[in-house]
Image: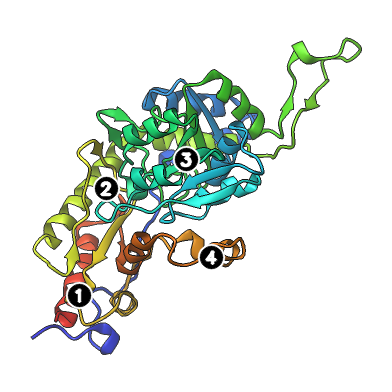
Amino acid sequence: MSEKLAVFGGDPVRNTRIHYGRQSVDQGDIEAVAATLRGDFITCGPKIKEFEDKLCRYTGAKYAVVVSSGTAALHCTCMAAGIKAGDEVITTPITFAASANCARYCGADVVFADVRYDTMNIDPQKIREKVNERTKAVVAVDFTGQAVEIDEIRKICDDNGMFFIEDAAHSIGTKYKGKMIGSLADMTTFSFHPVKTITGGEGGAILTNSKKLYDRLLLARTHFITRDPALRPEEEGIWWYDQIELGYNYRLTDFQAAMLINQLNKIDGFICRRKEITRIYDAEFSTYDEILKRTEIPESDTCNHLYVMRLNLEKLKCDRKLFFKAMYAENIQAQVHYIPVYWFSYYQSLGHKRGECPIAEKVYSEIISLPLYPLMSDKDVNDVIHAVKKIIDYYRK
């Protein structure tokens, strides 16, 4: 006899709610912020460069530019790449909207390439099918933290003279063929939102090995304003500056950078715990036909930002909505990542229609993100597993 579900009046597996993600902030983070606030600089100070240098050492990239958010990072990459109206940018529909919006901010059109059903990452073959003379860049997203097929996408971009932008908001700490994510694409972006692997409250970064792109990214971060003495008119003094393009204020504060320095010092521990929880989930669900297994490409040594469970709905007497509702009643606040971007009203207004990427839409109908973050206790993990198994047992065909 299966347990009575909480949604039908049974006892929930836990009395307090657990959410899908949560920041890991300790006294060291607080002290790093406080020390910076007591200093002379709270923005555009020395902690910015210190954190950028630390990111370069960690990732192996030559240059880093930190900005105010992961979205700002993506926008800066498109500005640095010179993307403009009339261009096209290819990305995946299974992502947060910013991966597509960054192209729209520059006036370009977004083209969605479908995902692989087994990995849920963008399918290189589908990218090839979408490339034309207007295609300027590919924004490939390391969904949940698993690296995309970097070598294949790199070749497609090189063969067609396109920029390869890796949206690694989920994948700081992941390695591809033994190399840290951050140094393999033309530009790689990170996010430091509270549910990501490290956080500054907000924040983002762009990594690149190109000095030319680095110089453009520095300008993109600060209104495209330059103070280069070589460009200064003879009649002007050292106060002079010039805005050379339309730009934005995407600067990060020094106290956020101070926190991020301390967070990056702890990233190995964060990665270890995320991998441990992922292994426990995988092992506990491995015998359940009601849960579909995701393929991990052998090149990716993945640090999961998300644990996305896929329901085999053919084996269940419920849909994803009912399963999600039952999880909530058990005090497990799951989430869904993501609604296909082109389903949004804004993209529909641009002419996109449902059915563009059928595999992505099937994936969307099956997925639920389970809680995954380093501060989860073993009891928290076991409660999530208990809730999933309890609901499956009830709805099993």
Counting from the top left corner in percent of width and height, residue 40 is at: 65, 28
Type of residue at label 2? Arg
Say which element carries label 3. strand
Pick whichever of labels 4 and 2 is earlier in the sequence. 2
Q: Give residue 3's quadrant in the image.
A: bottom left
Would residue 238 appear left or right of 193 to someone viewing this image? Answer: right
Would residue 287 appear left or right of 11 to someone viewing this image? Answer: left
Closest to the observer, 375 or 325: 325
Q: Mark 1 = which residue?
A: 314
Type of residue at label 1? Glu
Q: Can residue 198 be seen in this view?
A: no
Q: Mark 4 = which residue?
A: 344
Give the colour scheme of this rendering.
Answer: rainbow
Pick whichever of labels 4 and 1 is earlier in the sequence. 1
Which dot marks residue 89? none
- Distance from the alpha carbon under mark 4 to that under mark 1: 27 Å
Is 220 above or below relative to 341?
above
- Report the mark closest to the observer, 2 or 3: 3
Counting from the top left corner in percent of width and height, residue 177 is at: 25, 30
Q: Mark 2 = which residue?
A: 274
**Mark 2 neighbour density, 10 Å: few (under 14) some (14–19) many (20 or more):** many
- Distance from the alpha carbon under mark 3 to that under mark 1: 34 Å
Say which element carries label 1. helix
Would residue 259 appear left or right of 57 to someone viewing this image? Answer: right
